[in-house]
Image (spheres, helix red, strand yellow):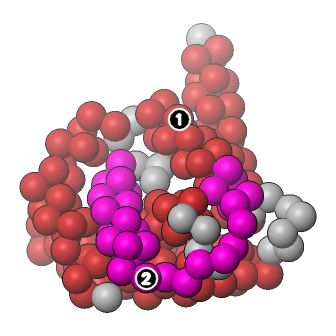
Amino acid sequence: MLLTSLPAAAAGLVAQDAVERRLGRPGPTAALLAGAGALLWAADRRPQDRPVGPKEAAAAALAQVAALAPGVSRSGATLTVLRALRVDRADATRFSMLMSLPVTCGAALLTVIRGRTAPPAVPTTLAALSALGMSVAINRASRRFVSAAALYRLGLATAVAARLRSRREQP
C-alpha cells in the first residue's frame, strides 16, 4: 500500500501549490467535479470480472496524482481507474480506501506543518465521514443504478455551478 502512495506524494510535494493556484477557483472545481463524476459513471458501467493485480494497483497509484486538482478526490480517481479496468466494485472500493490512507495522512501532516496549525476539526471530520459514507453507499449500490459516488459528484458540481450563476446575476 505504501508503494501506491509514492506517485501522489511526490507530485503533491512538487506541484500542489501550483495546481491549487491554477485550478482552485469555483468554476474549474465545478468542471472537475462534473468530469470526475461522468468518468466514474462511465467506468462503473463496465463488467466486474477482475481482481486487483499489479497492473491495476499501478494504474490506481498514478490516478491518485489527479487528486491534486480541486474537485477530484483520491478515492474517486482510484475507483474510476479500477472500475475502468473491470475490477469488482467491492474490491475496487476496499483497495481504493486502503491505498488512500497513507497519502491522506501525509497530506494532512504536510498541511499542519506548512500552516503551523492543526486543520479545523469539524470540516476534517465531515470529510472523513463523507468518504466513509460514500464507500458504504458504493458497496451497496445495485448494478442497475448509477454509482452513488458519481451522482454525488455530479450533484455537487451542479450546486457549485448554480451558486456561481446566481452570484453573476446579482448586481
Residue at 31 percent of width and 62 percent of height:
62
Residue closer to the observer: 96 or 26: 96
Residue 118: x percent and y percent? 26, 78
Residue at 37 percent of width and 65 percent of height:
59
Please give the label number shown on residue 31. Answer: 1
Q: Is residue 20 above or below residue 99?
A: above
Type of amino acid under label 1:
Ala
Please give the label number shown on residue 53. Answer: 2
Residue 87: x percent and y percent? 59, 74
Point out the image quarter for the N terminus. bottom left
Q: Magenta segment: does it hold 164?
A: no
Point out the image quarter for the C terminus. top right
Q: Quadrant for residue 105, please give it.
A: bottom left
Type of amino acid under label 2:
Gly
Residue at 74 percent of width and 58 percent of height:
45
Q: Residue furthest right?
A: 144
Q: Main secondary structure of the magenta part?
A: helix
Q: Is residue 4 above or below residue 111?
A: below
Crowd tier of the residue under label 1, counting other residues whose Cα lies within 10 Å: few below 14, some 14–19, many 20 or above: many
Tell me, yes or no, whether the two marked residues, 1 and 2, touch with CB atoms within 8 Å. Answer: no
- Residue 148 in view in this figure: yes
Disc 1 versus disc 2: distance between alpha carbons?
Answer: 31 Å
Q: Residue furthest top?
A: 171
